[in-house]
Amino acid sequence: MRKKFHRLAPLVHCLRVALVIALCVLIPPAHDRGRWAGERMPAPELSIVKRIVPAATRIDADADADGFWGIYDDQDKRLGRAARTMPAAKDVIGYRGPTEALLVIDEQFNLLGTQMLDSGDTEEHVRAVRNDKPFFDQFTRWNWSGPEEPAKIDAVSGATLTSLALAKGVLTRIGGNRGSLVFPDEISIEELSDWFPDAGRVENRDHRVVVFDHQGNELGQVLRSGPYSETIIGYQGPTELLLRLDARTGQEGQSEPKERSPIVRAIFIRSSFDNQPYVRYCRMERSFWNKFVDRSMAELAATNLEQSGIEGVSGATMTSLAISETIFATADRWADRVRETAERRRMESTLRGRLASWLGDIRFGVTDFACFAMLLTLSILKSRGLFRRRWLRSLWLAASVVVIGLWSGNLISMALIAGWGGEGIAWRLAPALAAIALIAFASPPIGKSNPYCNHLCPHGALQQSLRPKPKSRRRIRLPATLTRVLMVVPGSCLVIAYLLLLFRPSVDLAGWEPFHSYLYRVAPLTSIAFAIATLLFASVVPMGYCRMGCPTGRLLDYLRRSAGSNRVETADGVALALLLVAIATRLA
């Protein structure tokens, strides 16, 4: 019978691990992402904009088609444009959650500056980033494409993940198509009523709109020329056009394969800086527009003004020729963008392309390489049993404190688990920390060992160095009753912390453990004092904090597979109860 139950140990422990994974997945995000779900975001506060542009006196109430708000001085002269990094950067996770920033660009799409608006990270990390002027100064050297060397972004010491998440959010927001400064307004449904009388809503997609009826059926698409060709001047200024596209038919009534280029069904002058009488002549000349309609975008893209033989509208020659050139240039640049998108999708469909996309954004710093070297060295030392040599063991413990603790700050904690469980793992911004977390959580159930607590945790390393010998005078033997009570503390902290996360997701757990003190550049004095107190306790009670105070260590110990893994423990019942509560709160 005993052997039969022993064979169930792997299954029981797999269920135990699955229980922990489910609990982590059900941790709610610290910030409600629903506020970023809509396309329209509120304008940033003028007081924050003035930190970058002191002469600003007002900002547009509504964003333009590219998500920018115009900034003006007291003479109503536009000084630049402001944008928020959300919702574009909502998936960029730092230490505890996403970080939103404000960015301001000039008329040439150069960055004038950046400011932090909001962050889901811990208060100390956020404060450190806000107060680091050199960090924000580096953004003033960026253009629309970002820094000359993205890998050279200087992070804030002690708040690396938070600062890199902000920088990555800015890169995500400014990357891609620049939009139009001359014609910034997005297409409204009212403008399309003549073309689509049954339109129920429009959906903006990269300088074009997709029109749907009230039942959600697609009626067609409309492309605006402004973002593609705003610099073509007629008699005295550029003209923006709307092109109605139909991807479903070629000539009227004839079907066309979906992969073919869409057909231009109609063209409309939306706005113009040209001479208005000349613009009116062009509007009225139907034969002029017939030269472009019922032709595919690919055909128009392959044509230029000289090849077309178009002579223009009588009495408005320069204006009409500029409109013709605008149509050809828009089709050509649109076709280029379609080809780029198709090539990117083709690459992403291959294994090589997926790997390049998946691994391309990983940021490796010096501390990351140092931590990976530590992990590699650890595997060698353990496999050869070299930790039995006392001097080598002492040297390793010191290296753990310096490299993993004080230098990189790559410690596993409840705050990290809560952040990455609720928001996602920031493995691209912190590859070494993600690798350490993987080893910390995968080794106990797979290898029956706990390498993180035994060899990698800086606080554990210090406690091992301070551990009193069996006959040491400073060693204190606690009463058995008190020891039993203290041994319940780590698990109780885990339960309380998880319940708090379910009902108050923004709770900061960094102060619940002493690990935050290793980020000494940003750590508050209370965290440092807490760490010192736990080390003093460990200097008289061997590994006192590890055994009687560490919630993270208790979680890793719960995951460790052992000879008794086939037995159902009290902790299993508690974890199952927490899972039921988490599911209930998610469904509520």
Image (cartoon, helix red, strand yellow):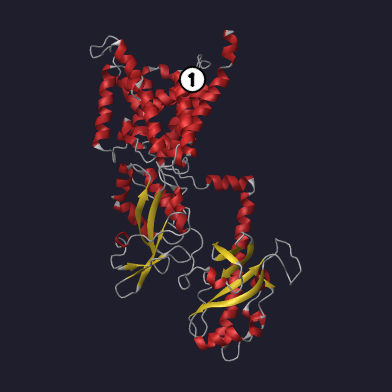
Residue at mark 1: 384
Q: Is residue 353 above or below residue 273?
A: above
Q: Give the quarter of the image for residue 78.
A: bottom left
Q: Is residue 204 above or below residue 348?
A: below
Position in image of residue 404 (x %, y %): 38, 33
Q: Is residue 265 above or below residue 30?
A: below
Q: Amino acid at mark 1?
A: Arg
Quadrant into which the N terminus falls: top right
Left or right: 520 as drawn, with respect to 338: left
Position in image of residue 48 (x %, y %): 31, 59
Left or right: 536 as drawn, with respect to 298: left
Of residues 499 and 537, the one drawn nearer to the viewer in this rendering: 499
Q: What residue do we see at 47% from left, 22% from top?
A: 573
Q: What residue do we see at 45% from left, 34% from top?
A: 372
Q: Give the quarter of the image for residue 43.
A: bottom left
Q: Is residue 87 above or below residue 265?
A: above
What secondary structure is marked by label 1? loop
Q: Give the quarter of the image for residue 114.
A: bottom left
Q: What residue do we see at 29% from left, 73% from top?
A: 74
